Each structure stands twice: as structure tokens, then as C-alpha cells.
Amino acid sequence: MSLESLKHAQRERILFLDQCLTWKGQANRRDLTLRFDISTAQAAVDFRTYLSLTPTPPVYDATEKTYFSSHDHRALSSVGPEEVFDLLSDETTFTRASIPLPTRILDPAVIAPLHRAMRNERDIQITYTSMNSGLSEPQWISPVQFHFDGESIHLRAWSYKHAAYRDYLPIRISKETDFVTRDRSSPLPFDSDWHSLVRLWIRPRSGLSHAQARVVRLEYGFEADTHLAIKTRKALVFYVKRRWRLDDDKARLELEKVEDLQV
């Protein structure tokens, strides 16, 4: 038996058990019954399945009727900070100890015609509000790609107004637009920035003490002693810099160089 051979529902329960034992250090049948609304008998089956899969079996405490992870516990899978926080949070707590994220609204009345134009390789007329000029003017674009910066969805498109590829936030596109489309008069120029890969070499900011630099490397998951290397598309470097605050004088990190990579 392997994790991949399990049906999806049971595999999700097994991974949840593994996460409980990894991050909370303990788990019991009640964790499964509350989380997945299953019977105690099914929870017992899941525990037996988990014990057959893990290379580091937990130890059962008959007094507390709970399994506790061993000192050499090795997780079956990895999860991100958001999943760990959700796991550690007390579900009975009225106010969760987290900062609310901005609500990024997406209107299907805007997204759908953009997606259709992209799939059909057509130009589309939009009314877009520029944050630089403050103007809201009709313009023709040719959508080619949606991308996500971890917080907002952006549309990459050829701008006939600027004769260049630009990124647009769909929320700034008026839904009152008629979204008229037309055939492309000619093939679009090659988007070299989108199809070029770069590596960003990031290091702790100059001026930090040795101890400060050491904890910064731990905080940001440096695998090497000196630098963190991030590979991305050249067109997305702006978003990496903004999300990692690399242009902020008070940031804990700084960008040393951007290296072009061969595709």
C-alpha cells in the first residue's frame, strides 16, 4: 500500500493525521471525526492505514488515548505556513490571531470576456483607469496571459496604445464597457520578457550584524550561507521585488544581482 494508491478522501485524512503529528505532535480519533465528520470506526481504520505508511510510527498513550509523534518523526508531506496556522489555531477562539488580507474582488462580467478574447486570439476594447494618470480611457488590447502575484490576478496583454506588453488589473477595467472585439490585424510581437528566465540573487541587507543576518537567512529559508536564489520570468521581476520589499530601505533583504538564464 502507498499514499498514492489511496482514494482521494482517505488520502486527505491520512495527510491531515500526518500534519497533526508533525506540527501539533499528537493526534487521536476525535481529530478525524471532528474534521471530516466520519465515524469512530472509520477513524480507527485511517489510523491503522497511517501506521502502515509512516516510516516513523507515533507512540500511543493509553491514559490520554492519543498518539504522540516520536522524536525522529518524518512528515509524509509538506505544507505552507497558512495550512500550519490553520492547523494550530483553536477553532473555539472567537477572534483568530491573524491579520486580514485585502479583499481582491474579481468580477466575472470582466474576466469572462477577457478570457474569451484570449482563447480566441482576438483584440478587445476596454476602459481602464490608470493609477499614474488617473484617466479612464477606452483602449484596445490583446490579452495573452493571466498571472498571479500571490495576492492579485493580473492580465498580461499587448497594448496598442503603448505598443508594448503591459500588465492590467482586471478590477480597474470598467464592467460598463461593451467589450467589443475584433480580429488581430497581424501576429503579436514576441513577448521576450515573458519568455525569458532570470535568477534573482538575494542576500541579507548590508549593515546587519552577523547574528541578525543569520536569523534573516533562517526566516526566509536560505539553503546556502550567503544567498537565496529565486528563478522567475523576467516579466515578473517587478512583482518579486514588491512582494519581498527589495526596494525598501528598511527591508531585511536586498537584491544583489539579476542573472539572465538560458531557456
Image: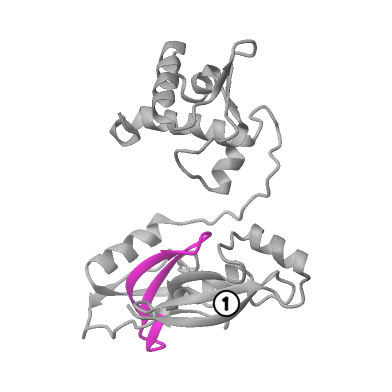
Q: Which residue is mark 1?
A: 131
Does residue 259 sit above or below 120 in this rendering?
below
Kindly state the secondary structure of the residue where label 1 is placed.
loop
Picture coordinates of residue 90, whole percent (x, y): 66, 31
Query: Does residue 24 appear left or right of residue 236 in this picture?
Result: right
Picture coordinates of residue 158, whole percent (x, y): 35, 80
The quadrant where residue 224 appears: bottom right
Query: Does residue 154 appear left or right of residue 226 in this picture?
Result: left
Nearer to me, 139 or 253: 253
The quadrant where residue 203 appears: bottom right
Q: How was the colour assigned to the protein in this rendering?
A: one colour
Query: Does residue 226 appear left or right of residue 169 in this picture?
Result: right
Residue 157 counted in the magenta span: yes
Q: Main secondary structure of the magenta part?
A: strand
In the displayed orientation, state which residue is furthest to the bottom. 163
Q: Quadrant of the image for the C terminus?
A: bottom left
Picture coordinates of residue 170, whole percent (x, y): 45, 65
Nearer to me, 228 or 155: 228
Nearer to me, 170 or 53: 53
Residue sitting at x 51%, y 56%:
105
Residue sitting at x 45%, y 68%:
173
Q: Which residue range is magenta in the image? A: 141-165
Residue sitting at x 37%, y 77%:
194
Residue 82 counted in the magenta span: no
Give the amino acid at mark 1.
Answer: Met
Query: Does residue 5 appear left or right of residue 53 in this picture?
Result: left
Residue sitting at x 61%, y 55%:
102
